Image (cartoon, coloured by chain):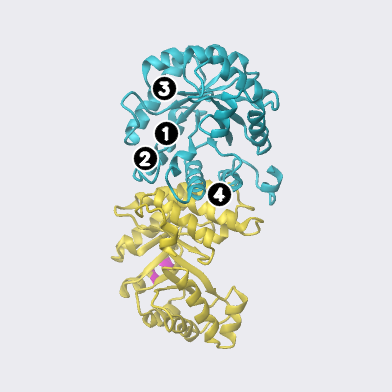
Chain colours: A yellow, B cyan
Amino acid sequence: MILIGERINAGFKDIKEAIVNKDGDVIKKWAKIQADAKATYLDVNMGTASKDPETLCWMIEQVQSVTDLPISIDNNKPDILKEAIPVCKKPPIVNSTTAEMAKLDTLLPIVADHDASIIGLSMDETGSPPNVEKRLENAGKIFEKILEYNIPPEHLFLDPIVMPLKYKQDQASSILEATAQFRFFSDPPCHIVCGLSNVSIGAKHKQLLNRIFCTMLIANGLDAVILDVTDKELVHAILTAELIMNKQIYADSYIEAFE
Amino acid sequence: MILIGERINAGFKDIKEAIVNKDGDVIKKWAKIQADAKATYLDVNMGTASKDPETLCWMIEQVQSVTDLPISIDNNKPDILKEAIPVCKKPPIVNSTTAEMAKLDTLLPIVADHDASIIGLSMDETGSPPNVEKRLENAGKIFEKILEYNIPPEHLFLDPIVMPLKYKQDQASSILEATAQFRFFSDPPCHIVCGLSNVSIGAKHKQLLNRIFCTMLIANGLDAVILDVTDKELVHAILTAELIMNKQIYADSYIEAFE
């Protein structure tokens, strides 16, 4: 399972303040905490705290000063990406593009040039997908485009667009079904990823909802997730789901071995 | 979700002793505990403690003296069932038949006569099914036979045969896939059930494995389960998976409301 740590994001108050105050220590702290929790990638997002490519580059440098983990660059502005990607010591994931043609034709050449990966959101200019069919249509458009730019399927992370269960309860089954279908676009398949925490927005039992939804998505083929990697129960649930899917060899102490 | 409480089973030492000593209190205690934990059915199994139909009838009477819950009669001997079913105040589930023709032709008329339900194990005289195809073949045989005896699909509980992950790790994906396929036998579909605890035989993290596997099965259409209904974390996981599948209307306090 590819675990993309979500915590270095200006949506969190301490990260926003760190950006404003140019305080690298907070960013390094979260890079270390998430690396220790066994993240595979670290997402880096400057949100509304800055529009300056230099800020994002600085954040990436802070992360890379304490860990070798690759970066998920949480930005879709071509001019920012062109500066931030070369700063990455390992090929990053670009997070993200929608299925809009203009966006794909701008972002994919940059991704291809740098041997990077990209998260493809199964939504377009009309907004969030209302059903399975629209998710598949959008994902199909993205898939076709990456082939056109010679980006291999394993560099694509399709995202079924997770919505809050509290407000869009009927969407959860569509998300599960779309995930199951994404697997069949190619063999070997592309990755399937989601922003997990969205499912529990506004909910009371957030962590329970996150981890149960995650295991149900894994049953349908999810192999990457943007998550709170410090949520131990969530990580244990993921490890268990992976054993069940026969992705890791069973050992009695599989959790202890991971930790 | 149909929750079948597994605890009144002579495989447990206290139940075996209660049978030997004709001590109804132990059986009543477990009937109450499981009813309080919100079981839908209570499984009753006299195991090797007795071969006398009277013993099973006595056990069912103990249960019915403290709860109105229907019974899952865990026995497949026609002479025993013919005596035990009439003792049940509500139509029971007969647990279980395999796909063997002789067994089906003996058990199904009894089930049909009493408006009972039956668990159909997707295995036959050759033993446990080695793959998805054999599970489907066996389940299909059972499905065909219930129609022949005018038993409605909603009185059939197909079981994909859960195996211990520790010893048969590759079977888990087959079980998930077979469950997904069982849904398509009819519309409305028959029930899909499993003996959940089997997945964690010999494992270290039993409860974690039980609850993660259960939610993955629910994602594929499982709607009934033989379980330790007193395992609160398991029940919470099931409630959450049902919300995700849109089987219950979302409420912030869905767990508190259930309890």
What is the C-alpha distance between the residues marked 3 and 4? 34 Å
Mark-to-mark CA distance, 1 and 4: 28 Å
Toward the viewer: A170 or A90?
Answer: A90
Which chain's residue wears label 1? B
Mark 4 on the same chain as mark 2: no
Amino acid tagged 2: Ser
Distance between mark 2 and mark 1 Cα atoms: 9 Å
Q: How many marks?
A: 4
Q: Provide the residue designation for mark 2.
A: B174
Mark 1–mark 3 CB contact (< 8 Å): no
Determine if marks 1 and 4 fall on one subunit.
Answer: no
**In-front residue for pair A149/B207:** B207
Q: Is residue B136 above or below residue A219?
A: above
Residue A109, picture quadrant: bottom left
Q: Which residues are magenta?
A: A102-107
Say what amino acid the circle numbered 4 marks. Answer: Gln
Residue A206's place in the image compared with B220, above or below, is below
Mark closest to the chain's N terminus, 2 or 1: 1
Q: Are marks 3 and 4 on the same chain?
A: no
| Residue occupying the point 33% across, 31% down | B134
**Chain under disc 4:** A
Q: State the residue position of label 3.
A: B142
Residue A55, disc: none
Callout 3 crowding tier (Cα within 10 Å): few <14, some 14–19, many ≥20: many
Q: Which residue is drawn at the image coordinates 60% and 29% (left, top)?
A: B42
Please tell me whether mark 4 sits on a helix, a strand or a loop: helix
Q: Secondary structure at mark 3?
A: helix
Label 4, label 2: how far apart the Cα atoms are: 27 Å
To which residue does mark 4 refer? A171
